[in-house]
């Protein structure tokens, strides 16, 4: 059992809590856990299940280690449950021998009126991993047996899917085995899958990990990370069936995970590291059209790693963000976006 420097986490909670109280729009800041049976954690995901919020992440000795498992916590009565191990990643190798593999990038998705789905990856590395999922009918308390996706499909690679009007679950996905290339995977029943793309060649722009925004009618926008250290963007005018060539926005990013969501009022929120180097600060930007972005909040700006955010809007209209805090814990921040002061980002420079 590894104690995660509880005194340091408590001090950070007190500091951020007082800072948050002084910032308009910051409703709450907290850690999902302060003690855990793993040394490092990363790549959180959050969803509003039938019975409340659910957060998952991967944790183990360190990223890529075969002891890295998928872990999960539920919010019950306003309190997060202790981390529960959901899948160890054991699978048969090519010789049919049970082998421990690392697990990667869980993604939670609540099907409206249906089950909670937990997608994740299993494998030695991102070039060789494969997709799997489990489902829960009771808000994440109990989970089904693992289901492996069809060969060649990984599901949502980091960020949550969106549900189209016809019932299609559209997942932003990507591969790293032949350059960094983004694509999309679509399903209505989790059994039959369709692949769309790739939408780039991995050479001119090396791009992965799409988030999907909805801009009305059949217009969608994808945003993600690139090796060019800028946020990339692509548009679909036919509900995700085809996508434009990638365009690099004037938003810096150190080739680190991002996430975005379209709100009920049709505005958009982007969470990312607004810097060309390192994984601090961690920033929140808002936009009315997905093209022009305004600075809204700085979640972290101290030395350290604050990365791989996940963002959703809950039924009450609040925005929930989780992210990696120094690989030691998962941080949860609640925002009232309508109360956040904003300033236009000009020429890629974050306003003072």
Image (cartoon, grey):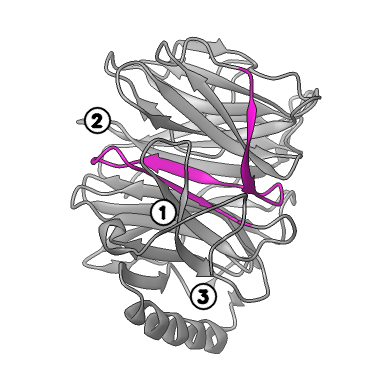
- Residue 66: x %, y % from top left: 72, 48
The numbered mark at residue 191 is: none
Q: Earlier in the sequence, mark 2 or mark 3?
A: 3
Which residue sits at x=52%, y=10%?
Answer: 242
Q: What whole-number distance in Å separates the C-alpha atoms at marks 1 and 3?
A: 16 Å
Q: What whole-number distance in Å separates the C-alpha atoms at marks 2 and 1?
A: 18 Å
Q: Which residue is mark 1?
A: 55
Query: What SS does tag 1 mark?
Result: strand
Which residue sits at x=33%, y=80%?
Answer: 21
Q: Earlier in the sequence, mark 2 or mark 1?
A: 1
Is residue 234 part of the magenta span, yes or no? no
Is 179 above or below relative to 22? Answer: above
- Which is more toward the observer, 291 or 55? 291
Query: What SS does tag 2 mark?
Result: loop
Q: Which residue is mark 3?
A: 35
Left or right of 314 in this view: 292: right
- Which is more toward the observer, 36 or 345? 345
Q: Which residue is mark 2?
A: 114
Is 259 above or below relative to 150? Answer: below
**Quarter of the image where the C terminus is located:** bottom right
Is residue 270 part of the magenta span, yes or no? yes
- Residue 65: x %, y % from top left: 74, 52
Left or right of 175 in this view: 281: left
């Amino acid at each position: 059992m590894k104690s995660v420097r509880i005194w340091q986490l408590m001090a950070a909670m007190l500091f951020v809590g007082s800072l948050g109280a002084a910032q308009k729009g910051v409703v709450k800041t907290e850690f999902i856990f302060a003690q855990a049976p793993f040394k490092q954690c990363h790549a959180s995901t959050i969803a509003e299940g039938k019975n409340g919020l659910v957060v998952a992440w991967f944790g183990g000795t360190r990223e890529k280690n075969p002891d890295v498992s998928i872990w999960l916590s539920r919010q019950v009565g306003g309190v997060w449950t202790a981390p529960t191990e959901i899948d160890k990643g054991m699978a048969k190798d090519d010789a049919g021998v049970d082998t421990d593999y690392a697990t990667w990038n869980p993604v939670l998705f609540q099907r409206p009126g249906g089950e909670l789905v937990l997608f994740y990856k299993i494998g030695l590395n991102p070039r060789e991993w494969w997709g799997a999922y489990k489902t829960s009918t009771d808000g994440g308390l109990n989970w089904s047996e693992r289901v492996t996706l069809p060969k060649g499909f990984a599901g949502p690679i980091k960020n949550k899917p969106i549900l189209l009007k016809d019932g299609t679950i559209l997942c932003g996905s990507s591969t790293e085995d032949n350059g960094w290339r983004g694509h999309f995977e679509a399903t209505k029943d989790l059994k039959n899958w369709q692949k769309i793309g790739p939408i780039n060649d991995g050479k001119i722009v090396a791009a992965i990990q799409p988030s999907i925004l909805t801009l009305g009618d059949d217009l969608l926008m994808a945003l993600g990370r690139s090796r060019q250290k800028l946020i990339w963007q692509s548009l679909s005018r036919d509900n995700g069936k085809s996508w434009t060539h990638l365009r690099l926005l004037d938003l810096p990013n150190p080739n680190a995970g991002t996430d975005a969501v379209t709100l009920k009022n049709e505005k958009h929120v982007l969470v990312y590291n607004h810097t060309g180097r390192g994984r601090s600060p961690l920033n929140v930007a808002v936009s009315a059209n997905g093209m022009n972005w305004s600075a809204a909040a700085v979640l972290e700006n101290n030395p350290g790693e604050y990365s791989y955010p996940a963002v959703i809007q809950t039924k009450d209209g609040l925005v929930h963000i989780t992210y990696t805090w120094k690989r030691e814990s998962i941080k949860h921040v609640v925002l009232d976006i309508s109360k956040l002061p904003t300033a236009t980002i000009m020429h890629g420079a974050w306003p003072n």
